[in-house]
Amino acid sequence: MSEFQLYKKRDFSALMNDTMDFFKKFWKNYFRNYVVINGALILLMCVLYFIFFKDMFKNMYNPGAASAWMTDNMNPTNIIGGLFFFLISIVLLVFTIAYPMIYLKLLKTKGDVSLTSSEVFNGIKSYAGRLIVFGLISFFIMLPLSVIVFAICIALSIVIIGIPMLILSVPTIMIWTMQAVYVFIDEDESYFFALKKGWKITFEKYWHVVGSTIITSIFVAIVSSIFTMVPAIMMVTSVVTTGGQPNPMELTPTILVFYIIGMIFSFLANNILFIQQGLIYYSSQENSVNYQAFSEIENIGTDEA
């Protein structure tokens, strides 16, 4: 049995504390395997990102130049390159979402034994197909639904009630989707059953779950922006010093390094949010089944033996 309890009833403070405790205990093994599995994909993503979007970044604060970039780059070579970029993005998305899920799943069965990258990678491969299926179905169901909800919230923002609705709708839909993914993968259920149970998990302890997710998201956003703030400040300075008509900004090696490190750091920091969503899922399982009580009974029998 792992010293870190996955199955545990958690309120707001427990979700926050256990998320931090997880990384205090497992951060070396977790991030070492993460870099081994996802490092090459992330670096390739960074390279492709700047190959295709560097000119747009140089004119980020010049709308006319940015629009011209969109028109000038619509040629067969760039379209094929863009499709390749999109494919890499999908593969990376599958791996980055699956990694924390598989890590927790293996932790549940193996306990505190250090997990190897091959074990996690094999687990990701075994569930990659279902993740892609979930994403494809969600593209036609969850995405349109999210757009409708956000549109309604934005429309209602002209009155006071629309603002809190907009603030809460983003984390609510994110939590609902992540919990549905956990049910779809961990319990091998159908898509619509996963959505139904994910909805139930989201609203079991709604304010605890949403509150912890919002606080963690703010923390992740602040941490992720540490490196990207430097080139952003330089761009804003360019706007101010040129009277609102900035010249294209030169992407020096220093700025590129900051951007690349910022992107990598963002991928790493998002794991904090993903792990917290996993703890929400296992906490919900404990609420309904009481795994911890069963485990304590089994341990008593073992100790007596």
Image (cartoon, rainbow, N blue to C red):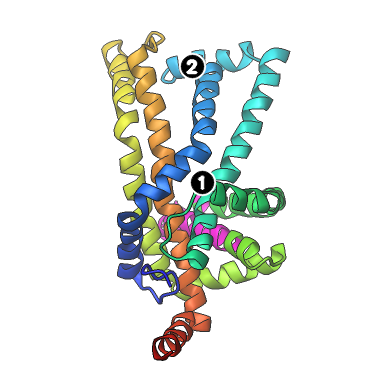
Q: Amino acid at mark 1?
A: Ser
Compared with 82, 271 (above or below) is: below
Question: Label for residue 117?
Answer: 1
Looking at the rendered image, the quarter that the C terminus falls into is bottom left
* Residue 2 found in image quarter: bottom left
Left or right of 240 on screen, residue 305? right
Q: Position of residue 39 (x, y in %)?
A: 48, 34
Give me the residue at 38% from left, 8% from top.
247
Compared with 69, 2 (above or below) is: below
Give me the residue at 49% from left, 26% from top.
46
In front: 152, or 179?
179
Q: Is residue 175 magenta?
A: yes
Which residue has dot 2 on it? 54
Q: Main structural element of the magenta stretch: helix, strand or loop?
A: helix
Give me the residue at 72% from left, 65% from top.
190
Total marks placed: 2
- Residue range in magenta is 154-180
Give me the residue at 62% from left, 32% from top.
88
* Secondary element at image label 2: helix
